[in-house]
Amino acid sequence: MSYDSALTIFSPDGHLFQVEYAQEAVRKGTCAVGICCKDSVILGVEKKAALKLQDSRTMRKIHRLDEHIFLASAGLVADARVLVDMARVECQNHRLTVEDAPTVEFISHYIASVQQRYTQSGGRRPFGISTLIVGFDPNNTPKLFQTDPSGIYYQWKANAIGRNSKTVHEFLEKHYAQDMSESDGIKLAVKSLLEVVQTGAKNIEILVITKDGNRTPNIQEIEQTIKTIEAEKIEEAEKKANKRKPATSA
Amino acid sequence: MNRIAEQLTLSASDNPNNQLDGGSSNTCGTGVQFELASGNNPAAFTQQYTDVKSEKDARIKMDHGTTTLAFKFKHGVLVATDSRATSGNVIASQSVKKVIEINPYLLGTMAGGAADCSFWERVLGMECRLYELRNKKRISVAAASKLLANLVYRYKGMGLSMGTMVAGWDESGPGLYYVDSEGQRVVNDLFSVGSGSTFAYGVLDSHYRFDMSVEEAKDLGRRAIYHATHRDAYSGGIVRMYWVKEDGWVAYPLEDVGELYFRYHPEIKLTHAAESPLTAQRAA
């Protein structure tokens, strides 16, 4: 008997196959990476190449949930649209009843709860997206949370979701440093995306969020960052080559 | 009639199966549900029997005899009330607790229907505790008063009678809100509620300063309640006073307003002074 046709059936070895298949759908989506720095948080996304006749402005991967909370998703874009709208309503609801801005943890908990609810009732399927939720809490600390189709949510210092996220995550583990500056954070985000996005600056979009606001570096800035990264790579390679040669002077 | 309030105060999920409440919003309380009067308009039905203003022959008349006051000052919030309950011309009790201890750092006062105040403030206490558990931090006074206002707004026009002040200390310092069953919710540094409030306001407005010391604030609160009980027939009994400071509220020893009369009018002397135990106490 197949245990994967209905959502509400466990398999004998404890799997909810529909949820796992949803996580597969996430792995097909474009990559997104989030990095917490000292006074800022960086979101980087892989943009799908815009088709000729398409208006690329309508292809948004990064959504604003509230004043200082943003969300990037990987997976089924339509599911993301629905979840984002629910989250936006919940943020406003929080402001109405509690007269205070929601924390990033609060809204991540809410989104995760919605995703979990859809893994436990009949007649529905799970949301086919993982999300990275970034922002600042009212006490000005930067935060990054990740949710997935099973409804879990965890806080991260840096993480990646979507296509090749494992590669990007390993890269982040190697190169992440605590309390980075904003420019170092942007560099790391671009570097990690370059691991999986071959085509360069036109397919990378970055969002920088600080406690006072947010900005989107334009394509020239990203290209400049890439040039700096390439230059540094060449420098590194030269240094390594020089090390192998024995010192000639006495 | 209150559908907007219902949509906002109940769980914000669009899931019709509300049993799976694990995904519901952390902010919105669940409150308690009552069966309402049948028909399309339960408010109109109950209004016939409870609203004295519009129906002269309303059968359920609530008495609002009381004096409660609260004010913010540099060191926190001072809350003071009387303790008399009247039904018609009879003094039902002289020792009513009109300050409700919602939790160790939030206080609510009671004016209007005693049952309405104490019941809904206990529900508020439950919601505040749930908020704390879900969000790992204390609820703000603004949020607590908002929860209470939203709870009772759903029953607007159905005969609830509650005029309460929510006092506490949160991250933004001392907080004080006035919430009533008509749906009003306002913020201010100084409030007095009840039939004796006009007398209390006279005393409070004359001597209130934000930078009072704790002793000055206590004396002001005590005096204001005393003067209100002196002139208002429906206020009396004892003065119950609380001071809300940063780490919670503190209750003060009770003082009988009869004794306060002699303290504030030292020129009045009882005849047969030596025989009265009251004056012996005063002399001591």
Image (cartoon, helix red, strand yellow):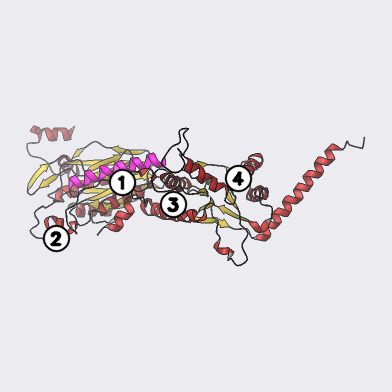
For the residues labelled 1 and 2, say whether their Cβ atoms are less than 8 Å apart.
no
Q: Chain of mark 3?
A: A
Which residue is disc 1 drawn over? Answer: B30
Q: Please name the residue that numbered disc 3 is placed on.
A: A101
Query: Is B59 drawn above or below residue B120 in the view shown?
Result: below
What amino acid is at disc 2?
Lys
A75 with respect to B282 (left or right): right
- The circle on residue A165 is 4
Image quadrant occupied by the N terminus of chain B = bottom left
Look at the numbered discs 1 and 3 and tell me whether their residues touch, using CB distance below 8 Å.
no
Residue numbers of the magenta segment: B109-136
Q: Which amino acid lies under the numbered mark 3 shown in the image of this protein? A: Ala
- Work out which quarter of the rendered image holds the C terminus of chain B and state it: top left
Label 1 – label 4 distance at C-alpha: 40 Å
Residue identified by numbered label 2: B53
Q: Chain of mark 4?
A: A
Q: Label 1 sits on what residue type?
A: Thr
Q: Earlier in the sequence, mark 1 or mark 2?
A: 1
Does the magenta run of residues contain B50?
Answer: no
Main secondary structure of the magenta stretch:
helix
